[in-house]
Image: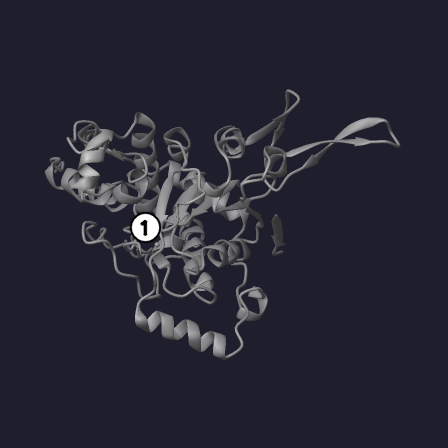
Amino acid sequence: MTEDSHHPSNAPAPDPVPPAPGPVTPAAEHASSPNPVTPVADHAATPESEVRSALLALRSEVAKAVVGQDAAVTGLVIALLCRGHVLLEGVPGVAKTLLVRAIAAALDVDTKRVQFTPDLMPGDVTGSLVYDARSAEFSFRSGPVFTNLMLADEINRTPPKTQASLLEAMEERQVSVEGDPKPLPDPFVVVATQNPVEYEGTYPLPEAQLDRFLLKLVLPLPPREDEVTVLERHSSGFDPRDLDAAGVQAVANAQVLAQARTEVASVEISRDVLGYIVDICRATRNAPSLSLGVSPRGATALLATSRAWAWLQGRNFVTPDDVKALAHPTLRHRIQLRAEAELEGVTTESVLDTVLSTVPVPR
């Protein structure tokens, strides 16, 4: 079951992605993540600063529809800058679907939603060949994967065969039909959701597919004040299906995003900071509580997300604080606990906390 839209977490712990700088009051960060360096003020409105300001303005636009998820918005912006995919985890009703729709509206890009179910087939996602009796030929009917922001809702409720149908699309940004590759639009980002409290009848994502996601973001239950604000909006007539009525407007577009990616690629990173990223990843491979550590792909992902965060902060260089700030959401789904460690109450978050506190920080 798909929905098309085009416009012109036991409760999980708060996600440690730091909210991007801006006028909106930031959400609380994870205790292990230090405050990133204060962004450099732009005194003149240069084209680069305008591009950055447009993406930072996404938070204010999304906040018109979604309350108290600034960190998740920042994480999704980072994923868009890095051309990466996102795994959203949270209990039902924390606005995961609304968040993706609001970001698509604020970016003026296309979005499609697929409800993953046990009977969903790969062709229902990627598309399939359909026989046309009038022309006596097969024609390709594209699936919902041909979009800019694809919401794979409850991805762990569909069998591995269908989950795997996303692998080529996520990695190669194309879909092959009878050996014929069909490119996907740019930008293309998969935002997959899963419920952390209900595992009966689910198919856990294999490590190979988890590693394809750039970030894993945890959406917490909102604090009391934010929940009161949500109810106030609904009592005043807010309709989550009508983002136009909520005042969500496009503040950026695909061209702005492409220019921002070019600028992010020019952000410098010293050899010492590169070594710091490698040391963090190698420390997870030697952690006694883990059966699986971070792969080299995870190290390149941490490099990319740190770069994007530094650019959002207004800097053209990466600091160790940038790496620390993005370590949890970039690495938490790439490590696997030993069974005995889980029985002792060890979590992936606590392992990453230990790694970050023990790996020497370059000066």
Relative image position of residue 42 (x, y in whole percent):
33, 56
Considering the numbered disc 1 on the image, is that residue within a helix, a strand or a loop? loop
Measuring 48% from the left and 32% from the top, which residue is drawn there?
A: 160
Q: Residue furthest front?
A: 200
The residue positioned 35% from the left and 70% from the top of the image is 226
Say which amino acid is labelled 1.
Gly
> How many marks do you count on the picture?
1
Residue at 32 percent across and 32 percent down: it is: 298
Disc 1 crowd rating (10 Å Cα; few below 14, some 14-19, many 20+) is some
Q: Residue at x 46, y 57 (%)?
A: 99
- Residue denoted by label 1: 314
| Viewer-closest of 336 and 138 | 336
| Residue 290 placement (x, y as % from top left) | 21, 32
Residue at the right extreme, as displayed: 134
Judge from the rendering whether residue 166 lies leftward or rightward of residue 29; answer left or right.
right
x then y, percent, for residue 293: 25, 29
Left or right for 237, reference 315: right
Colour treatment of the image: one colour
- Of the 4 image quadrants, the one containing the C terminus is top left
- Choose top left, top right, bottom left or bottom right for residue 199: top left
**How far across and how far down the image is residue 82, in percent?**
41, 39
Q: Report the side of 266 relative to 284 (left or right).
A: right
| In-front residue for pair 240/12 | 12
Can you name the residue that lies furthest to the bottom here? 236
